[in-house]
Amino acid sequence: MLGRNRGPPRVVRHSSSRLQTALLIAGVLIGVFALYVVYELGRYNAGYDRQAVAQRRAELEVQIEHLEKTNRELRTRLAELDTIRVGRAREQAEVARTMGDLQAQVARLSQELAFYRGVVAQGAATAGVRIEQLRITAGQRPATYIVHMSLVRSGRVETPATGSVQMSLDGTVAEGARTLDLATLTAGRQRELRYNFRYLQSFEQELTVPLSFKPERLNVEVSSARRDVAPLSQTFLWSVEASP
């Protein structure tokens, strides 16, 4: 029996190994905890406040949500403005079309009115031509002007009136008085204007005046193709209206 009790104490060694393992695990946990405590102390000493950071994060999340909401509202408003813009463009096109129709009607009525004015003013039996309107506006290019002129009948209308119109411009240059004819004012492109109408005819003739020339009077002579109708001569003061 004594010989049997002298064997190795296996149970005692097994319990000692477990104790060492438990102590090792506890030491590791304590070390990890100590490192975490040291880490938190370091952040605290550096001015880091977890509660303040959490509060700031919540505030930023609220701001982000508010900005996203504002962004959605702005996108909706932009879509509404695009719709309004398209609608206004259509309205402007419709108004422009209506204005064009009205202007065409006004022009037609003006022609009829000019004709009847001529009939009332001139109750003669011979069919003559007179200048109903003449005005001058500035052209698109420097030293260019547009002469707007309307011719009407001044008697009974049975056949079209035909003939020509001559223009000349009186003025002064450094050397003195000078007169420029239509060929000079149009660089040789036109020497006279031809007309052929029954009631009314309008002209828009471009004139180019030399820069050294100072216009004073515009002379217009309307000649009929009929020999029994005397030419009509009129002089207009050179007055340039503002372009519409």
Image (cartoon, grey):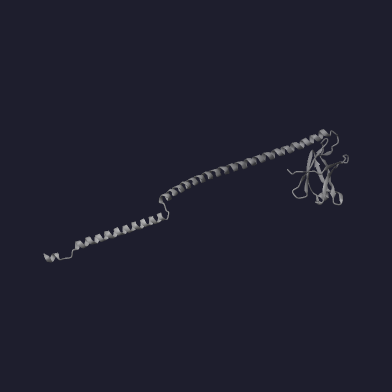
Residue closer to the observer: 52 or 196: 52
Residue at 45%, 47% in the rendered image: 59
Q: In the figure, residue 238 lies in which quadrant?
A: top right
Residue 67, given in percent of the width and then of the height, sits at: 50, 46
Q: Residue at x 81, y 34 (%)?
A: 119
- Please state, as top left, top right, bottom left or bottom right, where the C terminus lies in the image: top right
Q: Quadrant of residue 113?
A: top right
**Across the whole image, how many numbered discs are drawn on residues?**
0
Q: x and y percent of residue 1 in the render?
A: 11, 64
Q: Is residue 185 visible?
A: yes
Return the residue found at the far front.
45
Give whichever of 60, 97 is nearer the camera.
60
Residue 149 in view in this figure: no
The residue nearer to you, when weighing 29 against 241, is 29
Q: Is residue 240 left or right of residue 59?
A: right
Horizontal arrangement in the rendering, residue 64 relative to residue 203 (left or right): left
Horizontally, residue 172 falls left or right of residue 88, namely right
**Against 136, is 42 above or below?**
below
Residue 225 position within the rendered picture, expressed as x and y whole percent measured from the top left: 85, 42
Residue located 80% across and 34% down the image: 117
Seen as rendered, the residue at the extreme left is: 1
Query: Percent from the top left, x then y, of residue 24?
Result: 28, 60
Question: Which quadrant of the view contains residue 99?
Answer: top right
